[in-house]
Image (cartoon, rainbow, N blue to C red):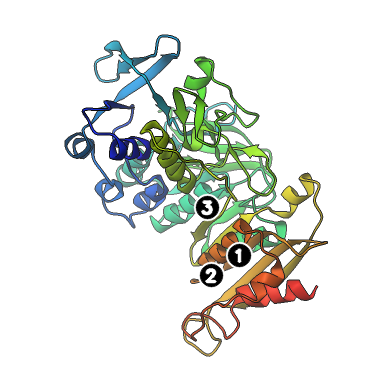
Amino acid sequence: MSAASQARRLRGPDDLEIVALERGSWTSYSACGIPYYIGGLVDTVDELISRTPSEFRSRQHIDVRMRTEATAVDLDAGAVSIRRLESGEESTVGFDQLMIATGARPLRPVVPGLDATGVYGVATLDDGWEIRRAVLDRLPRRAVVLGGGYIGVEMAEMLLERGLDVTVVLADPLPLALLDEDMGERVCAAMGAMGIEVVTCAPVTGIETGIDGGVRRVLTESGGFDADIVVLGLGVRPDADLGRAAGLAVGDSGGLLVDARQACRDDVWAAGDCTETTHRLTGKRLSIALGTHANRQGRIAGTNIGGGTATFPGVLGTAITKVGTTEVARTGLASREIEQAGMSADSTIVESTTRAGYYPGAASIVTKLLHERETGRLLGAQIVGGPGSAKRIDVFAAALWNEMTVADIAGMDLSYAPPFSPTLDPVTITARKAARA
């Protein structure tokens, strides 16, 4: 919808007819807010919706057709086959320009019982509504979260907030695998201190169900875990099936291939989690499912559809989350990714506080930098700490974007007052230590 809105800003309804097809029940909502709606921190679905279908129709003259699924695309004919989910009615919609924003689907391991009642993905607001309804209506006592990515740890916290006993089951050695091991260990310890049981190196092998077909137990290579509800937090894959079936090119990660304009070809555009993008540090094409990228890519595509000129400059993979009072953030490359790229790097890690040590509310913060051995150029940064820690990652993201060295960062003019940082901010302290090295 960011693409549709941007195209409409550039071309009026008499010049460009816009039809939007949505198989779900809501448009233009914050997918990142779904765990917090499930946990009750957000009271109603309406709070997550930035614009309703009726507002798109009345304010922007965009013909939004809800509960309507695109089943096939004929690129030669310029037509999309559609099916109304309520009635089953099938028809076609013609196009001169096609925008594909089909998002991503939760990864689902091929194990028996995963289609049982009580097993949920967390990809759409429809999913969030179903999980919240299940938690409130069925009153489950035990939850198992499969996977420890961003959604996995957020859902674990929110289910704990709802009063459930929560077990997070990982195939990996630690949660948040995009962090280095020493930083992931801190997150794992924080989850345990909250009362979340974390089981590592335990790939799921099956789901046991009761006579009613509902989930009863999660089976893994390390044993079984009782469960009344199971949430999939194993990550997502690009939902590029519609474009692939139409003959559009797909990359190694499974996302649609687009150029810097977000174009698959002259009359077909794509953006968001269904596409691949380029990492600014390695030049590698990859799929990163983040709402910040999706929204900006949508605006780029919409600008070009509307007759303007815009390009997407790539990504750093900057991300932030929290579990309990522990904030977590990362940007750029982790140690494993640096090694895979054939680069050499040193690391610097510093423990400090979020405020002046004497000021009430000062919390611990651990900052880790990864920097090129020969030049000192920053390659990545990770932060784990208490309240007030994680948004410091944006300083490092800006430094990465502009190819700064750790010495450059150490000399930056950053703000200071006791309620906000020590005299030397953790950003400065860590960069200074790295520069000395």
Circle 1 sits in a helix, a strand or a loop, which is it? strand
Q: Which residue is mark 1?
A: 383
Quadrant housing the C terminus: bottom right
Q: Position of residue 32 (x, y in %)?
A: 42, 48
**Gap in angstroms between the C-alphas marked 1 and 3:** 16 Å
Q: Which mark is residue 115?
A: none
In the rendering, which numbered label is found on residue 389?
2
Q: What type is the residue that disc 1 sits on?
A: Ile
Number of on-image labels: 3
Tell which of 342 and 158 is nearer to you: 342
**Distance between the alpha carbons at the discs numbered 2 and 1:** 7 Å
Dot 1 surroundings within 10 Å: few (below 14), some, or many (20 or more)? many
Residues packed near mark 2 inside 10 Å, few (<14), some (14 to 19) or many (20 plus):
many
Quarter containing the N terminus: top left
- Between disc 2 and disc 1, whose residue precedes? 1
Contact? badges 2 and 1 (CB < 8 Å): yes
Give the class, few, some or many, for how many residues have Cα within 10 Å of label 3's Cα (few <14, many ≥20). Answer: many
Element type where label 3 sits in the image: helix
Q: Decide which of tag 3 and tag 2 comes sooner along the chain.
A: 3
- Dot 3 amino acid type: Val
Visible residue check, residue 189: no
Q: Residue at x 19, y 40 (%)?
A: 59
Mark 3 vs 2: CB contact within 8 A: no
Question: Sequence-wise, which precedes: disc 1 or disc 3?
Answer: 3
Label 3, on which residue?
A: 153
Q: Indicate the secondary structure of the residue bearing disc 2.
A: loop
Mark pair 3, 2: CA separation: 18 Å
Residue 284, placed above or below residue 371: above
Which residue reaches farthest left?
58
